[in-house]
Image: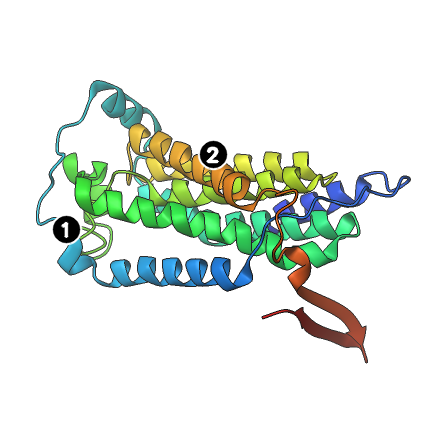
Amino acid sequence: MRAIAAITLSAALVALVSLSPAAAAEPSPELTYWPETDLPITVVGGAAWVATELAKKGLAPASCRWCAVGRLDASVRDAVVWRGNPDTAHDLSNVTVLGVAPASALGLTALAAWHDGRSENITADLLIVTEAMVVAMDLNQLTKYVVGRQRPYAHFGNDDVLCSHGGCSPPVPHDADLSFFSGHTTAAFSLAAASGTVASMRGYRAAPWVWAQGMAIAALSGYLRMAGDRHYLTDVLTGAAVGSAAGVLIPYLFHGPRPGVAGPDTRSFRLSIAPAHGGAGVGVAGHF
């Protein structure tokens, strides 16, 4: 998977560099951005998600509340699950969502700003993208604990999953009834949609590449969750819908340009990077 990640980012960099730099890019719109508000929301929301993961034993339902499986979910599950090695798909989905998807979304957004000569936007852009993902994941976590849907490997008694770690029991304690909806898919689609939305709102020339790369990776993550027998089709589709909605609406509704509204914007907080004695120097300036 390191090779996949390297190829993904290399292809993105080649695509950005290949864009014609003949005409200077128009100055990108300033987005509404309050670091004193957006940063705490992101940090507290992320901490809340981590806390609920650590407290899974007390929060997860003792048994499934949603145990039945519809015909569509059952038929798709039979068609796509990796027989004999579903854990390989599960591992690949972890690498994709925890590594490739954030590296692509955040990296391409930063590269798009840099390529257009708007490096001062990078800090705000990345925080907005991360904020959208955190909000989507908190909503996902709350829904999982409330709904209590049984995972497919548990419902169908898939020994390739249950007996693959030295004992025939759920591979992750207290996790067998947290299927709805897919957190991996939610994270990947929220990152893809938020990075694409921010790039489009800024008017970056590389915005189409940001959208295409992010959505392709997100779709792959959803497929791998089903191939690993961790989620049903409806889990994945719901995660894609919620993640995409959060990724589009949070930047658009809360961070879009507000003509005539006074207040801090992206120029109130800047991160600069410059060569220094064979290395790099980092500087932060702004109003805090």
For the residue pair 259 and 210, the one nearer the viewer reads as: 259
The disc at residue 44 is none
Mark 2 neighbour density, 10 Å: few (under 14) some (14–19) many (20 or more)? some
| Residue reaching furthest to the right | 22
Element marked by disc 2: helix
| Residue reaching furthest to the left | 62
Instruction: Look at mark 1 in the image and give the residue it sits on.
Output: 168
Res 264 → quadrant: bottom right
Instruction: Look at mark 2 in the image and give the residue it sits on.
Output: 219
**Vertical order, 143 against 266 (above or below):** above
Residue 111 at x, y percent in the picture:
70, 51
Distance Cα–Cα, label 1 vs label 2:
31 Å
Element marked by disc 1: loop
Q: Upstream in the sequence, badge 1 or badge 2?
A: 1
For the residue pair 19 and 231, the one nearer the viewer reads as: 19
Q: Name which residue type carries label 2.
A: Ala
The residue depicted at 89 percent of the width and 39 percent of the height is: 23
